[in-house]
């Protein structure tokens, strides 16, 4: 596996800063010291990965021993260059390596049984990606060691994330085929792009941002997959085109994942964000943000009106009721390797 | 009710679903400032560096974001990142879907960087139509420039009550509201 080195990141950063008449030594002065001396300052982002362009900004991550901060990014400008500065708490970072060690001992898929755990993991990986794939500009030895250990654990975690997401999107695409052909086509494409991201991660392209996928494939010299990537980008505009597009990409997906022995997932359905119940006599309206809903009516006075969420089962076990709730956008999907 | 400064007449238009109006304008402004305009800047920048594959993905993303916002005026729901059952085409008329995807096609299907560059104009026109429909008199300056940041904060202050009164999910990230 070829992983980008500090020397290469430094070269990319130097070249970019030089274009703005700056040097690396100018950067630490952009980090606000009012929150205390950072224990680690890392420069990160597309510029360091070699994907930068003249409109790119430079992301700076400062780890500080202070609780009263948020991850609200601070903006600063210098000689036309935009710096995005994010402060991270020592207390948050301290537990992350143990969490990664635990997660990477798990199975083929990450255990993210609901929306909240998915969001938390996505957010965690977004932040850790910047530190794992970033260049330490200053910091204490203890925290430079922390970064080295993060880099050791990172590839497995990132690859597992993309595989889990590939399975989740593929499952959704399959369900949507009979409901919304265009949305199904989009999700088939998304599933394949995530499988490609996992392949890239296995080959050492470990930057989390999915917008660089095409460039990663080019950098790896995988011309046949670049061609397929281009075909995925060209979305169909009608149902007939969507069916053909979905079938073609489902075949490519099967090829991409063939070596991984991915499990048949358990589906976990939860009410989507913003779903609430409104009741009136024998009626129950399951609605989301008051914009869409599905009404259930009990057949007689004493029958309880309810709907079948949360639910766990296999794809083949989905009922018409689940499909109706899915069609109306009322369901969040998680996938798990083991039945919860 | 008085509308405007009392000068030129303002033509009224009936809105049958004010909550969808609120969803379109709150999500629309946020997405325009935070996502679409950044993607437009990226599109120009990555083509300058010859990253054609990223340009394809970016143009496609802009078209999808525009459609997703349009869907809020029809059968769509506010975006929730990671929601794999979300349908950005929900209720959007077929010709509008085709037109948005066609606007991106000049970049998405470009044979080389030069033809992708010439496809940017159609993408910009797609976004310009969105900007007009969101009620802007002109294209707002990018939030990633000093000139754009404060007007954006003023707009968010105007939209936050709309967002809350319509009982829609807050489009501004939770951490923004607790910033020091």
Image (tube, rainbow, N blue to C red):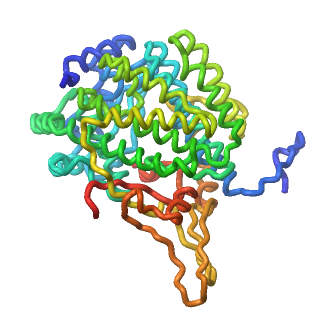
Residue nearer the viewer, A245 or B165: A245
Residue nearer the viewer, B63 or A23: B63
Image coordinates for residue B150, horizontal then vertical, percent: 55, 37
Instruction: Give the residue displayed 53% in from the left and 66% down from the top.
Output: A321
Which residue extends farthest top?
B114
Instruction: Give the residue displayed 59% in from the left and 23% down from the top.
Output: B105
Image coordinates for residue A280, horizontal then vertical, percent: 63, 80
Image coordinates for residue B117, horizontal then vertical, percent: 56, 14
Image coordinates for residue B113, horizontal then vertical, percent: 51, 12
Q: Where B12 sits versus A275, above or below?
A: above
Q: Is residue B166 left or right of residue A75?
A: right
Q: Is residue B151 left or right of residue A264?
A: right
Classify residue A112 by image quadrant: bottom left
Classify residue A143 by image quadrant: top left
Q: Where B134 sits versus A116, above or below?
A: above
Give the quadrant of the C terminus of chain A: bottom left
Give the quadrant of the N terminus of chain A: top left
Classify residue B53 by image quadrant: top left
Q: Is residue A157 left or right of residue A324?
A: left
Instruction: Give the residue displayed 41% in from the left and 67% down from the top.
Output: A310
Residue B153 visible at all: no
Q: Where A72 sits versus A220, above or below?
A: below
Residue A229 visible at all: yes
């Amino acid at each position: 596996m070829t992983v980008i080195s500090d020397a290469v990141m430094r070269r990319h950063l130097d070249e970019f800063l030089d274009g703005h008449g700056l040097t690396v030594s100018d950067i630490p002065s952009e980090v606000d010291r009012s929150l205390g001396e950072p224990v680690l300052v890392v420069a990160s982002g597309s510029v360091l990965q070699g994907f930068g362009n003249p409109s790119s900004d430079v992301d700076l991550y400062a780890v500080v021993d202070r609780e009263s901060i948020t991850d609200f990014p601070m903006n600063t400008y210098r000689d036309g260059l935009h710096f995005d500065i994010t402060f991270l708490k020592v207390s948050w970072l301290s537990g992350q390596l143990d969490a990664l060690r635990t997660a990477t001992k798990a199975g083929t898929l990450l255990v993210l049984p609901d929306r909240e755990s998915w969001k938390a993991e996505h957010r965690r990986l977004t932040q850790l990606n910047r530190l794992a794939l970033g260049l330490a500009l200053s910091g204490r030895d203890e925290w430079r060691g922390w970064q080295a250990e993060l880099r050791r654990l990172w590839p497995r975690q990132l690859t597992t994330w993309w595989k889990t997401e590939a399975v989740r999107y593929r499952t959704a695409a399959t369900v949507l085929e009979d409901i919304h052909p265009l949305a199904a086509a989009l999700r088939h494409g998304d599933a394949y792009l995530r499988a490609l991201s996992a392949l890239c991660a296995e080959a050492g392209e470990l930057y989390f941002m999915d917008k660089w996928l095409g460039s990663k494939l080019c950098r790896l010299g995988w011309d046949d997959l670049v061609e397929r990537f281009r075909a995925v980008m060209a979305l169909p505009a009608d149902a007939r085109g969507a069916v053909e597009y979905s079938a073609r990409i489902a075949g490519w997906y099967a090829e991409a994942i063939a070596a991984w022995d991915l499990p048949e997932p358990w589906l976990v359905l939860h009410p989507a964000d913003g779903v609430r119940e409104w009741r009136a006599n024998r009626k129950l309206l399951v609605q989301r943000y008051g914009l869409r809903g599905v009404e259930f009516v009990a057949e007689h006075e004493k029958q309880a009106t309810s709907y079948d969420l949360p639910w766990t089962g296999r794809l083949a076990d989905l009922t018409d009721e689940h499909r109706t709730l899915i069609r109306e956008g009322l369901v969040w999907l998680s996938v798990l390797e083991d039945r919860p | 009710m008085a509308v405007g400064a009392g000068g030129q007449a303002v033509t009224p238009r009936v809105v049958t679903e004010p909550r969808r109006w609120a969803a379109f304008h709150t999500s629309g402004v946020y997405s325009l400032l935070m996502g679409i305009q950044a993607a437009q800047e990226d599109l120009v920048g990555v083509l300058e560096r010859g990253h054609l594959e990223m340009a394809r993905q970016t143009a496609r993303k802009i078209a999808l974001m525009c459609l997703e916002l349009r869907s809020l005026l029809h059968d769509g729901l506010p975006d929730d990142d990671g929601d794999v059952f979300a349908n950005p085409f929900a209720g959007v008329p077929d010709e509008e879907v085709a037109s948005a995807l066609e606007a991106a096609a000049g970049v998405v299907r470009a044979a080389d960087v030069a033809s992708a560059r010439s496809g940017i104009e159609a993408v910009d026109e797609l976004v310009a139509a969105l900007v007009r429909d969101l009620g802007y008199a002109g294209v707002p300056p990018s939030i990633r420039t000093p000139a754009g940041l404060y007007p954006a904060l003023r707009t968010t202050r105007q939209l936050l009550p709309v967002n809350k009164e319509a009982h829609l999910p807050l489009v501004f990230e939770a951490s923004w509201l607790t910033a020091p």
